[in-house]
Amino acid sequence: MKRSFIREILEAIDEETISFAGGLPSEKLFPRDDLKVATLTALDNPKIYQYGISNGINELREQIASRYTKEGFPTTKDNILITTGSQQAMYILAKFFENKDITIEEPSYLGAMNIFRLNHLNMFGVKLEDDGINVEEFEKSFKETKLAYLIPDFQNPSATTYCDEKREEIAKIVKKYDGILIEDSPYSELFFDKKNIAISSKLPKNSFHLGSFSKTLVPSLRIGWIRADEELLKSLMIIKESIDLHSCGISQYILAEYLKDEEKYERHLQEIRDDYAKKANYFSEQLNKIMPEFKHQKPKGGMFLYGSFEEGIDTFALVQECLKKKVVFVPGNQFYIDKVPNPEIRFNYTHSNFEQIEKGIKLIKSCL
């Protein structure tokens, strides 16, 4: 096991470094005043200081369930397990499926891959295309593994979004082989045009749908969740209880208080979408202008822009040179099972301003 390259990079840089590496939200968009009010109100509740139930406080689970139901995915609080960030959700699931085979996208989320390795899951990668995973290859793999981990909405790292047709096909394949889909969905609310229907909504008894408030509110509260069939969730409770008994009660009560005003939360989400859309467009424009040899698709949502140089450029070697000039990104080899050097890069555009974006791309160009 090795540490996450991204976490190591975050520790190695200083305030002068322009970082396109970590998936950091914009700090200017944190609803600090509203969260301050919610916090002061929540702190008056004596229950906030006591142990809580393992699956999460009822009010917060009901609020999350209500959002699913309004989107056409019928859900009750009994279908929700609160976790300490969606990273813990993945760890719980990886521990539950320990030593199994699992089908994943390539490239895929580095944090999930590390968790799967730690729990001895044997990963089989299937190539991502511009509109989602290669369905034919997915079926070949899933027929054998009967377990898959996918990020269909603004995928990390590729920013790919699955088309409606592929979502239907994936759901049919999972049902056909009576397998399980782990659908990771931390970016689904960060759409620029429309929100897509979760694949899990088409197979509620054969899926775990993962969500998080880290990307839409603030990461430090560390609150995520798993949405699944009640019987499936019962199987996870022993693992959850053995890790931490329950997720932070203070964070849960603050969130529950904040989410009482749904219109306020929706306005906040729209503010994030508008800001990120402008940054994604600007980042893409500057790449085309300053570094046209880097081929990419403009994101339709999420937090990342992904692309590639022509063969012959090792972006893992490139980032070492860029670090000396105080600009960093994540080289594409980190998102593959074998980690063989390749010419791909993942850029995070949400945490930088326009000036930093232009300057950072120019510094990378100078290192080529």
Image (spheres, helix red, strand yellow):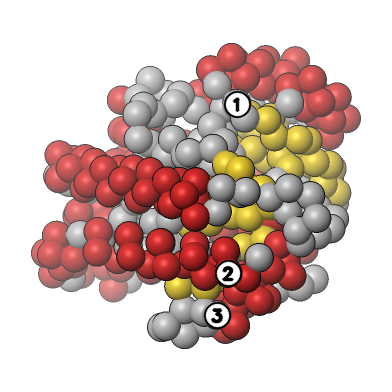
**Disc with the residue nearer the chain's start (2 vs 1):** 1
Give the residue displayed 80% in from the left and 71% down from the top. Answer: 1
Residue placed under numbered mark 1 in the picture: 131
Q: Amino acid at mark 3?
A: Lys
**Disc with the residue nearer the chain's start (1 vs 3):** 1
Q: Residues within 10 Å of mark 3 (few under 14, many from 20)?
A: some
Residue 353: x %, y % from top left: 32, 63
Is 269 displayed left or right of 287 in the figure?
Answer: left
Residue at disc 3, secondary structure: loop
Distance (Cα) linking label 2 and label 1? 33 Å
Give the residue displayed 43% in from the left and 56% down from the top. Answer: 349
Give the residue displayed 26% in from the left and 43% down from the top. Answer: 274
The residue nearer to you, when weighing 313 against 37, is 313
Residue at disc 1, secondary structure: loop
Which label belongs to residue 225? Answer: none
Q: Amino acid at mark 1?
A: Asp
Q: Residues within 10 Å of mark 2 (few under 14, many from 20)?
A: few
Q: Would you say the residues marked 1 and 3 are in contact, meaning their CB atoms lie under 8 Å apart?
A: no
Res 52 quadrant in image:
bottom left
Judge whether 64 appears above or below 325 on screen: above
Residue 193: x %, y % from top left: 34, 29
Residue 196: x %, y % from top left: 44, 26
